[in-house]
Amino acid sequence: MIEELIEIDLTGEEIYPEEISEEYTAELFEGIKRTIIVNSYERNSKARQLCVKHWKAICVVCSFEFEKSYGEIGKGFIQVHHLTPVSQIGKAYQVDPINDLIPVCQNCHSMLHKEEPPLTINLLKLLLQTTNENNNSSR
């Protein structure tokens, strides 16, 4: 099975731009249709709404607010992060929208899930703060 996944490039392995050789980029194709079988965990939209109502549509990591940057089209736009991954729980459970969920922008949400297990909110805040301080001091 692993060989088949590797053959059709479904291993989940990330390839970074600096790792791609010139020959590899000679012929690049997109749009090939593939059937992929995955487990999908249902999310409760009411829990999301209650989370955003409580915390507001502001990223708890970087404080980005879509409405301030994009106007009316960005109103209420935010992703919601499960502090304990649903896949880790592995079954239906009663979610607490205020204590189990937290609003984050797409960039921060992606960064939280860049590692396995996902980074904590506090660690990502620290990384962002440290990087910003280092960037500001080098100017």
Image (cartoon, rainbow, N blue to C red):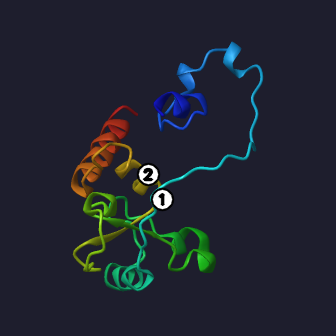
Of residues 69 and 37, which is closer to you in this image? 37
Among the 4 quarters of the image, the one containing residue 50: bottom left
At mark 1, the secondary structure is helix
Instruction: State the image coordinates of residue 120 (x, y, percent, origin top left).
Output: 24, 54
At mark 2, the secondary structure is helix
Of residues 108 and 20, which is closer to you in this image? 20
Report the residue marked by disc 1.
106
Compute the Cα span from label 1 to label 2.
Answer: 6 Å
Instruction: Name the residue: 38% across, 44% down.
Output: 114
Q: Are marks 1 and 2 in contact (CB under 8 Å)?
A: yes
Q: Residues within 10 Å of mark 1 (few under 14, many from 20)?
A: some
Q: Is residue 49 above or below residue 81?
A: below
Instruction: State the image coordinates of residue 134 (x, y, percent, origin top left).
Output: 31, 36
Instruction: Identify residue type, mark 2.
Output: Ser
Instruction: State the image coordinates of residue 6 (x, y, percent, origin top left).
Output: 53, 29
Q: Quadrant of the C terminus?
A: top left
Report the residue marked by disc 2.
110
Instruction: Identify residue type, mark 1.
Output: Gln
Instruction: State the image coordinates of residue 97 (x, y, percent, origin top left).
Output: 29, 80
Instruction: Name the residue: 53% across, 34% down.
Output: 5
Q: Is residue 64 above or below residue 71?
A: above
